[in-house]
Amino acid sequence: MRKGLRMLPTDRKQLRGELVRLIEQQIETLAKQACEELAEEELRDYEERKKRIEELHNALHHPVRAA
């Protein structure tokens, strides 16, 4: 994550795009889990995406402002 840097509008668009893609993957994983058990790798990927989603959310909603 680029902490301490001012985000430009294009950075925000890229972050939002990544956030949407990750949330869609999370939804797909949850839908799959409703029908079958997930493999360890799928669970690990889910948890990693969850952490990244939180980072992106924080970056978008609490951006670091230039001094």
Image (spheres, rainbow, N blue to C red):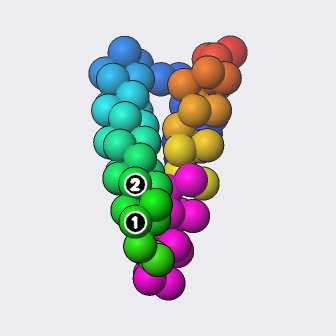
Q: Is residue 3 above or below residue 7?
A: below
Q: Is residue 49 left or right of residue 11?
A: right
Query: In the rendering, which numbered label is found on residue 35?
Result: 1
Which sits in the foreground, 31 or 17? 31
The residue type indicated by label 1 comes to Cys
Question: Which residue is disc 2 drawn over?
Answer: 31
Measuring from the top left, give residue 2's x and y in whole percent.
Answer: 53, 42
Q: Determine if the magenta segment contains residue 45.
A: yes
Q: Is residue 29 left or right of residue 17?
A: right
SS for callout 1 = helix
The residue at the far bottom in this view is: 40
Measuring from the top left, give residue 51's x and y in whole percent.
Answer: 60, 54
Q: Quadrant of the C terminus?
A: top right
Q: Residue at x 32, y 32 (%)?
A: 17
Which sits in the foreground, 56 or 63? 56
Residue 22 visible (yes or no): no
Q: Is residue 40 above or below residue 60?
A: below
How many marks do you count on the picture? 2
Measuring from the top left, give residue 61's x and y in whole percent.
Answer: 61, 21
The residue at the far front in this view is: 35
SS for callout 2 = helix
Cβ atoms under marks 1 and 2 closer than 8 Å: yes
- Identify the magenta region: 39-50
Residue 31 visible (yes or no): yes
Q: Residue at x 39, y 28 (%)?
A: 16
Measuring from the top left, give residue 38's x and y in whole percent.
Answer: 45, 76
